[in-house]
Amino acid sequence: MTGSARALCWAYVLTSLFLAHCAATSVRADAWWYAAALFFVSLLLGVAFAREHVAADERRAAAVRAERAARLRNWSSQSRTDQEDGCCERWWTSCGAEHDLPHCARKDQAA
């Protein structure tokens, strides 16, 4: 969670607590309509707080998926390069590729 999102969540919590206090004060003054309205607004702030946490989790999961995909692409390209350069290697590391002297990466090999 970023610093601004964390600050926003704290603002939601503090505002919700203040509205709950205002609702309790309104109940003591027999202002039921105000108390109900303040209570529901306080609940909406609780929903906003929960939504911030869900959004942060989704951003974190998306970043993990992107990192995994980048690692997989890097690993796949490295594997292809290793197979293409492996013509002088043993058969189990070159996947059975025949030795191709004109295109061989290792110039010290003879035919």
Image (cartoon, grey):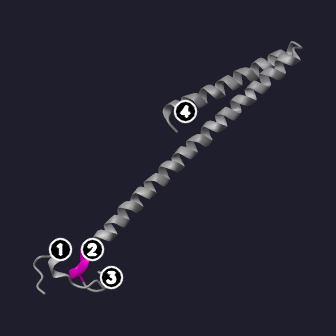
Q: Earlier in the sequence, mark 4 or mark 2?
A: 4
The single residue placed furthest to the top in the displayed view is 29
Q: CA distance from mark 3 to mark 4?
A: 52 Å
Query: What amino acid does circle 4 point to?
Result: Arg
How many residues crowd around disc 4 within 10 Å: few (fewer than 14), some, or many (20 or more)? some
The CA span between labels 2 and 3 is 10 Å
Q: Element under label 1?
A: loop
Q: Is residue 89 above or below residue 2?
A: below
> Which of the two marks, 4 or 1, is nearer to us in this view?
1
Label 4: which residue?
6
| Residue 84, disc | 2
Which is nearer the N-term, disc 4 or disc 1?
4
- Say which label, 3 or 4, has the lower sequence index: 4
For badge 2, the amino acid type reads Glu
Q: Is residue 71 above or below residue 106?
A: above
Per the model, the C-alpha gap separating discs 4 and 1 is 54 Å
Instruction: Give the amino acid at mark 3.
Output: Cys
**Are the residues flagged by discs 4 and 1 in contact, CB closer than 8 Å?**
no
The kind of secondary structure the magenta stretch mainly shows is helix
Q: CA distance from mark 2 to mark 1?
A: 9 Å
The residue under label 1 is: 105
Q: Are marks 2 and 3 in contact (CB under 8 Å)?
A: no
| Position of residue 92 measured from the top left corner of the image (x, y, whole percent) | 31, 85
In the rendered structure, are the residues bearing label 4 and label 2 in contact, judged by CB atoms less than 8 Å apart? no
Question: Is residue 80 part of the magenta span, yes or no?
Answer: no
